[in-house]
Amino acid sequence: MIKNLNIVSFNIPAPADYGGVIDVFYRIQALSKAGVRVYLHCFQYGRAESPELEAMCEKVFYYPRPRTLFHQFSFLPFIVNTRKNNELLKNLLQNDYPILFEGLHTCYYLTNKKLRKRVKIVRSHNIEHHYYSGLAARTSHGLKKIYFSIEARRLKRFERVYRFADRLGAISESDFEYLGKKYGKKVFLMPPSHPNNEVKSLPGRGDFILYQGNLEVEENREAALFVIERIAPNVDFQFVIAGKNPCESLVVAAQNQSNVRLVANPNSTSMDEMIANAHINFLPTFQSTGFKLKLINALFNGRFCVGTRQLVAGTGLGDMVVCCASDAGLIRELKWLITQEFTNDNIEKRKALLKEFSNSASVSRLLNMF
């Protein structure tokens, strides 16, 4: 087993408070517990240096991420062009340890000749050009639509750098299939890391339906409004919308619906309590890209889980989620589940199905690739 590993992260993965950084943070934690000395290289924007990471890693390097209009004028994707830094390459060359690139965002130096003899693994967090194409299709904001469309084209072209990776980790089964067709046997399945070590779902009933997510993200704002405006008025039950920095339109929409309560910026303890105590974790999503970590958290800690089909596409978690393609179907299933009790049999079945999604299993797959 390898003893030392460089990890290049797109952001400082602490605090672990949104999808991508949660994945990176708990992978680092699992690697550390497995005895791997991690040399973490992370781009810094909007986050402070982290003593927690510094205690967990052998060394942590921080690099500024300038995000100016100038960086848009390039054939490189903006999310890549703003994460190139000569100091990063210099520090990677200070040792000969393998390198794990977290996301296409961090792959600017993947093709660098000075790293040609190094073992390089990329963990794909998404099929990025699919994700940005989806954002472009769903936004009504003119400038955002132009940016997302241009970025999608740039990302599709840039993705070819994956040819220079020794191994390529796919986050979901659908991504594994897509990447495998393009890059062959170097692709392996590597589900996301997360804060859960065991299933803690409670038997019995809850008295509300929960939608939760980072409400700064446009996709999540859209889903929250969908719950408030199209689902909650048709289900006679309390709904809670919880997440980070809700916009004014979301606040107003929640105030106008009598059975909806909005919880802005809950701390992690409060969020965990809401996930555990909800009768149903309701997680509609309208893009089938990547892997929703909030789904993993809901399954490890919550009772019933309901969502759109895009939520589970390619995840291997479909047997644990009630999914529907229409508003009417979602309303019908929510009304039915309200009458049901979450049993110990439900919990035991979930424990059996979630074994392969443990952090230790995911890190074992990664280490085997080296």
Image: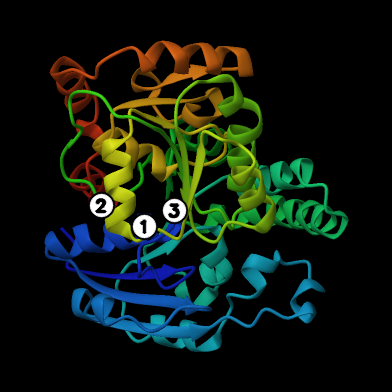
Mark 3–mark 2 Cα distance, whole angstroms, equals: 11 Å
Q: CA distance from mark 3 to mark 1?
A: 5 Å
Helix, strand or loop at disc 3? helix
Does residue 143 appear left or right of residue 333 in this picture? right
Identified by mark 3, the residue type is Gly
- Residue 113 versus residue 361: which sits nearer the camera? 361
Identify the residue shown where x is 67% and y is 57%: 248
Q: What residue is pinned by disc 3? A: 19
Label 2: which residue? 195
Question: Residue 31, relative to residue 349: is it above or below?
Answer: below
Say what amino acid the circle numbered 2 marks: Pro
- Amino acid of disc 1: Ile
Residue occupying the point 73% across, 51% down: 152
Vertical position of residue 166 compared to residue 333: above or below: below
Q: Residues within 10 Å of mark 1 (few under 14, many from 20)?
A: many
Q: Camera-side residue: 154 or 197?
A: 197
Q: Is residue 342 visible?
A: yes
Q: Position of residue 251 (x, y in %)?
A: 61, 52
Q: As displayed, is residue 282 above or below residue 50?
A: above
Figure quadrant of residue 345: top left
Residue at the front extreme, as displayed: 258
Q: Residues within 10 Å of mark 2 (few under 14, many from 20)?
A: some
- How far apart are the two marked residues, 1 and 2, measured between alpha carbons? 8 Å
For the N terminus, the quadrant is bottom left
Residue 22: image tag: 1
Q: Residue at x 66, y 44 (%)?
A: 253
Instruction: Between residue 282 and residue 84, name the one nearer to us.
Output: 282
Q: Secondary structure at mark 2?
A: loop
CB of mark 3 within 8 Å of CB of mark 1? yes
Q: Which mark is residue 62?
A: none
